[in-house]
Amino acid sequence: MIETDLLIIGAGPTGLFTVFEAGLLKMKCHLIDSLPQPGGQLAEIYPKKPIYDIPGYPIIMAGELVDKLMEQIKPFNPGFTLGESAVSIEKTKDGLFIVTTNKGTQHKASSVAIAGGLGVFTPRKPPIKNLPAFEDKGVDYIVRDPEKFRDKRVVISGGGDSALDWTVFLAEVASEVSLVHRRTSFRGHLDTVDKVQELAQQGKVKLITNAEVVDVHGTDQLSQITVKQKSTDNLLIDCDHWLPLFGLTPTLGPIADWGLDIDKNAIVVDNATDYRTNIEGIYAIGDVNTYPGKLKLILCGFHEATIMVQSAFKRAFPDKKISFKYTTVMGGVGSLE
């Protein structure tokens, strides 16, 4: 049994910043995340995506922001349960919560903050009959380790930020990179689109538009794909890896069965107080929550975390008083009376 003052479900940017705010109040935190590393979507899906709305940073890459947040919370020594999903919750007679993961790891805390971003992600898979046979055998829906593709022949499908970001990144890693897209226009950031076009002109990326992958081939591993084009005959491309990056469909997963008020796959909270849910002691912050006027921005998640920990502190230490002081005065360390 892992015991902590505040249990945070979700180790994305909002969850990580919660550790900092709670740490200023000398609260011990532990985080659960189904991903194998902290950072949430920023680390798993968009590590090379630029972010423009973090105060003090005109531009910062998603992966770099995760690194900065991890550096910021290091003094508070949070615990992590990674690669496991929170599946059940129960409330004890003394008002504490016990959260159990899919691997049986149990956690006990006086408060639970759900900071699960948009939830559990399921990849959108193209309708190719024999595709499952090649999953993790050349077909990947998420890039977890770019080194896996070093000196390999890679085909990427998609027209959004993820497909474009990884095309740019893997152009310097793989031996060959082809980008297949059903249209001639892209949905991603204009700067990234320009970079892809430039790489195509330099011969570092093969750009195949008005086309889509319709079949995969190989024995034990992927070796070829068939690309259907609108105006010409089908192409048969030799490759070691195919990345169909058509986005991920978010769901709340098991949390949806915890008795929380849900509205359109988001958890309803009271933003007039402390982002509490309908269950006392359970909060929801960041993109996972909803309330009138909600904006799904990292910046808003940071604000919600700051307010929420004040309430969680009172549950963890009902006999202690918070003495709020500016971090510029305290040198980053909170003060309790």
Image (cartoon, helix red, strand yellow):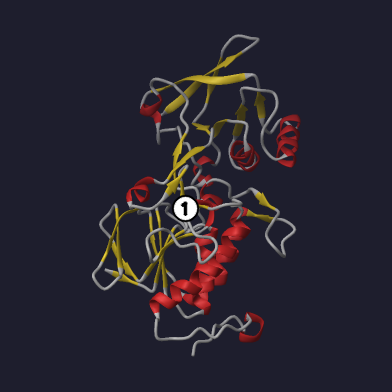
> In the image, what residue occupies the spot 49% across and 46% down?
144
Left or right of 45, for residue 61: right
Mark 1: which secondary structure?
A: strand
Question: Which of 306 and 244 lies nearest the eye of the viewer?
Answer: 306
> In the image, what residue occupies the spot 61% across and 29% down?
178
Q: Give x and y (percent) for residue 244.
A: 52, 31
Question: Which of 320 and 25 lies nearest the eye of the viewer?
Answer: 320
User: Does 123 appear above or below 24?
Assistant: above
Left or right of 182, for residue 99: left
Q: Give x and y (percent) for residue 179.
A: 62, 29
Question: Which of 39 and 133 lies nearest the eye of the viewer?
Answer: 39
Which residue is denoted by mark 1 in the rendering? 268
Question: Which of 210 and 16 lies nearest the eye of the viewer?
Answer: 16
User: Does 177 appear above or below 335?
Assistant: above
User: Does 83 appear above or below 6?
Assistant: above
Is the N terminus in the top left, top right, bottom left or bottom right quadrant?
bottom left
Q: Give x and y (percent) for residue 207.
A: 67, 26
> In the image, what residue occupies the spot 54% across and 60% down?
271
> In the image, what residue occupies the spot 54% across and 42% down?
150
Type of amino acid at the residue the image marks with label 1 = Val
